Amino acid sequence: ETAVFQTPNYHVTQVGNEVSFNCKQTLGHDTMYWYKQDSKKLLKIMFSYNNKQLIVNETVPRRFSPQSSDKAHLNLRIKSVEPEDSAVYLCASSYWGRDEQYFGPGTRLTVL
Amino acid sequence: GDSVTQTEGQVTVSESKSLIINCTYSATSIAYPNLFWYVRYPGEGLQLLLKVITAGQKGSSRGFEATYNKETTSFHLQKASVQESDSAVYYCALSDPSGSWQLIFGSGTQLTVMP
């Protein structure tokens, strides 16, 4: 049963545009994450966030930013997309201090 | 840095045959990592299959087993008799329970079970 929801499923855009992806979890978790899965299927953490702190992977370009309205939502904004941003973006959630994460189905971004 | 290696990108097995998917890890900065197998079925999100936190212990779920081997730094996934419904992508992962708790994933292994 799906408990981490992501929209949209797919998005195609052009270089330089701004995009935003949504993520919502209904598990009552207090921590959410964004991962990037590249063309080689490698899954890499981008952000982890709860109401106390934001942890940013140092390799994430500044054009990426997480946006949260409450602990159940964590959106991902890309200010000016570039071709290398084409990937699948996965959202996940957990309790803080727990490593069992629950994942959404992903959003596939294609940058033309 | 810490990493997880899955050497096979794709594995094809006939139904009812046995399966092993290899996973090795390098945890240079983590004394006692937690080890995981996640699975992604077609059209679904990544989900936890099993987790083991103690070296020497075996985890099991849905007929799959994996043993935490600290000596060989391995966590291979095995099943005695696969079914067509096991076709999915399997990811090995580790975390640091005394640090960030963040997951580090392998590159995944696509399992195809032939009828």
Image (cartoon, rainbow, N blue to C red):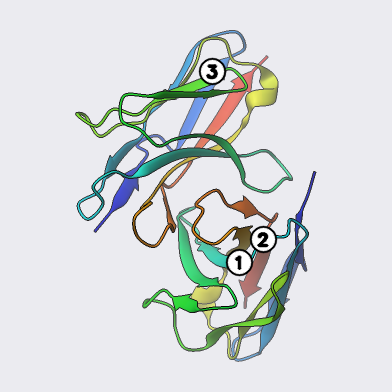
- Quarter of the image that includes the C terminus of chain A: bottom right
- Quarter of the image that includes the N terminus of chain A: top right
- Decide: few, some or many residues near mark 1? Use Cα within 10 Å; few <14, some 14-19, many ≥20: many
Separation of marks 3 and 2 at Cα, in angstroms = 38 Å
Callout 1: SS? strand
Q: Is residue A30 left or right of residue B5?
A: right
Callout 3: SS? strand
- The residue located at (50%, 11%) in the rendering is B18
Q: Nearer the viewer, residue A51 or B29?
A: A51
Chain of the residue where label 3 is placed in the rendered structure: B
- The residue located at (77%, 68%) in the rendering is A7
Contact flag, marks 3 and 1 (Cβ < 8 Å):
no
Foreground: disc 3 or disc 2: 2
Contact flag, marks 2 and 1 (Cβ < 8 Å):
yes
Separation of marks 2 and 1 at Cα, in angstroms = 8 Å
Q: Position of residue A63 (x, y in %)?
A: 52, 88
Q: Position of residue A80 (x, y in %)?
A: 58, 90
Q: Nearer the viewer, residue A110 or A80?
A: A80
- The residue located at (58%, 52%) in the rendering is A101
Residue A29's label in the rendered image is 2
Chain of the residue where label 1 is placed in the rendered structure: A
Name the residue tied to disc 1: A32
Foreground: disc 3 or disc 1: 1
User: Is A62 rendered above or below residue B58?
Assistant: below
Residue B13's label in the rendered image is 3
Foreground: disc 2 or disc 1: 2
